Image (cartoon, rainbow, N blue to C red):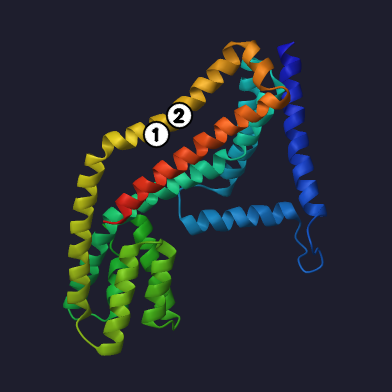
Amino acid sequence: MKVTYIISIWVIAVLIFAIYFIARVWTKQSRIADDSDYISSFIKKKQNLIYKNDVNMTITSYMTIMILSPIILGIVSFVISRNFLITLVLMGCGLLVPDAILLFLKNKENKLFEEKYEKSLEQLSSALKAGLSIMQAVKEVSDNKFIYEPIRRRYQKLYADLTMGVTIKEAFTQFAKSTNSDDAVDVALVIEIQEETGGREAEAIMIIAKDIRERLTLRKELRAMFASTRIMIYAMDVLPLITLLFMLISNSSYQNYYLEGIHILYLIGFLIMCAMGSFINHRKLRKIMKEV
């Protein structure tokens, strides 16, 4: 009997994917302007997203997670709950798993970038103090094996832009946009001002590096101060959902009451309120941390 359930879940998963992609192909506005089908354009879009975020993930692993997550969640939820509605909801949530992992890796890389970027600026400032030009200083940083690898790749791209004839102002502005870092934006603004008014870039960049170091120290102190608050917020995110799932799975009477008729609106309202509360709490915490 369990084999039949597993096969049913597999067939449902395949049908959901097939219907989704077929619907998107048929509803596409223009098939003449772009010869590629929706699946190819979808994969290309995700490849560009992974490349833009510069995380340690391949499109193969992304698609594998996207296909397996709904199936695994569907099988586990159906074996435990024996309820098709819960199974379908969790299978739908499984489609969001690869994007959630991508967001987690991106946030992790952003934190590492903040911590390591200051070292690269010190190297850049030292090269400028030694009498090298901006292009030569950037080349020096991009060749330094002790610089954090993702940052070094950014400097290699920056050096390639400069050698292709992109102006210093535009190259550093593109660098700042690609990193999505306020510190990199500050460096781009300093370079732009120094190019227009003249001055010593090395000293200005060293001042920014010192400012970044002080900000990082303050951020670490704030994280330590708000550690208990962060734990409480994450607990409030997870505990209501765990409690709800436990109630629905452990007692079939709750399933019969909340998953049938108008009572399902109560369940949806509860989930919406949980999502709104989580959004407000995380937004306030991010705002506090970002003001530093």
Q: Amino acid at mark 2?
A: Val
In this view, the residue in front, 49 or 181, is: 181
| Among the 4 quarters of the image, the one containing residue 214 | bottom left
Q: Which residue is found at the position 37% from the left and 80% from the top?
A: 169
Q: Position of residue 154 (x, y in %)?
A: 39, 64
Q: Is residue 5 left or right of residue 159?
A: right
User: Pointers 2 and 1 in contact (CB under 8 A)?
Assistant: yes
Quadrant of the rendering where the N terminus is positioned:
top right
Compared with residue 31, is residue 86 higher up or lower down, i.e. above or below? above
Compared with residue 152, is residue 245 higher up or lower down, i.e. above or below? above
State the SS at label 2.
Answer: helix
Q: Which residue is found at the position 76% from the left and 56% from the top?
A: 37
Quadrant of the rendering where the C terminus is positioned:
bottom left
Q: Residue furthest bottom?
A: 197
Q: Amino acid at mark 1?
A: Tyr
Q: Which residue is found at the position 51% from the left and 42% from the top?
A: 100
Q: Position of residue 16 (x, y in %)?
A: 75, 37
| Among the 4 quarters of the image, the one containing residue 264 | top right
Measured Cα–Cα span from mark 2 to mark 1:
6 Å
Residue where numbered disc 1 is placed: 234
Crowding at mark 1 (Cα within 10 Å: few <14, some 14-19, many 20+): some
Q: Position of residue 270 (x, y in %)?
A: 56, 30
Residue where numbered disc 2 is placed: 238
Q: Is residue 78 visible?
A: no
In this view, the residue in front, 62 or 77, is: 77
State the SS at label 1.
Answer: helix
Compared with residue 230, is residue 146 higher up or lower down, i.e. above or below? below
Q: Is residue 63 left or right of residue 112?
A: right
Q: Is residue 279 visible?
A: yes
In this view, the residue in front, 89 or 156, is: 89
Crowding at mark 2 (Cα within 10 Å: few <14, some 14-19, many 20+): few
